[in-house]
Amino acid sequence: MFLQKTARVIEALIFASPAPVPRRALLPYLENEDQITEVLASIAARYDEQSGIELSDIEGHYAFRTRADVAAFLTLERPIQRPLSRAALEVLAIIAYHQPITRSEIEEIRGVAFGTNTLEILMELDWVKPGGRKDVPGKPIQYLTTDGFLSHFNLKKLSDLPTVDELGAAGLIDSTSIDNAIFVSSKFFKEKQDET
């Protein structure tokens, strides 16, 4: 009976939250940490294949998402206060595939310097965050993507990012002239190793 009531409370908490709820935020509602898996499984079971929504696990953060097979029938309009520039999109892509990465490394990959406000815009959108300092002279700040980035682009983990072959098949890049090594990140490789 306790777990049923707790599952309802946690379900409501996740539903009402404007952002994915971290696992640790659910712990105060439980008698012990071992119950969390059972509670989340019971919530997920309520949203079976017949439902239009599902409980998603985004790197240990939980949110309700539209099922992929019905998402195409929905449109969501969000006011964007300032459209992202081409430079900001390039910087975001470089950070996503090469993180953790410093500003100078981003500029080296792009072949051109970029404005200070480019990173500020990405951090304001909660897609990028500082991720410590690189252990080299000058100790430059490294940048990483956030859970907000994963949530916005509907990714469960970084390894869900499209590969060179997938981008080429979609006609977005010429994959014959691109070295696969540029589409890597230490976080991406760590996820791949964890999966194996």
Image (tube, helix red, strand yellow):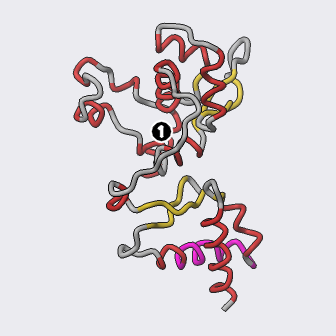
Q: Position of residue 46 (x, y in %)?
A: 48, 79
| Quadrant of the image containing the N terminus | bottom right
Q: Quarter of the image holding residue 25?
A: bottom right
What is the magenta range?
A: 31-42
What SS does tag 1 mark?
Answer: helix
Magenta span contains residue 164: no
Magenta span contains residue 41: yes
Q: Position of residue 68 (x, y in %)?
A: 36, 58
Q: Amino acid at mark 1?
A: Phe
Q: Badge 1: how crowded within 10 Å, few (<14), some, or many (20+)?
A: many
Identified at 66% across, 33% down, the residue is 124
Identified at 60% across, 30% down, the residue is 122
Q: Nearer the viewer, residue 196 or 182?
A: 182
Q: Main secondary structure of the magenta part?
A: helix
* Residue highlighted by disc 1: 188
Identified at 41% across, 45% down, the residue is 160
Task: Using residue 63 as the reference point, say whether residue 131 is left or right of it.
Answer: right
Task: Using residue 155 as the reference point, say whether residue 145 is left or right of it.
Answer: right
Query: Most extreme residue toward the bottom, as rendered?
Result: 1
Q: Nearer the viewer, residue 12 or 36?
A: 12
Q: Position of residue 171 (x, y in %)?
A: 24, 30
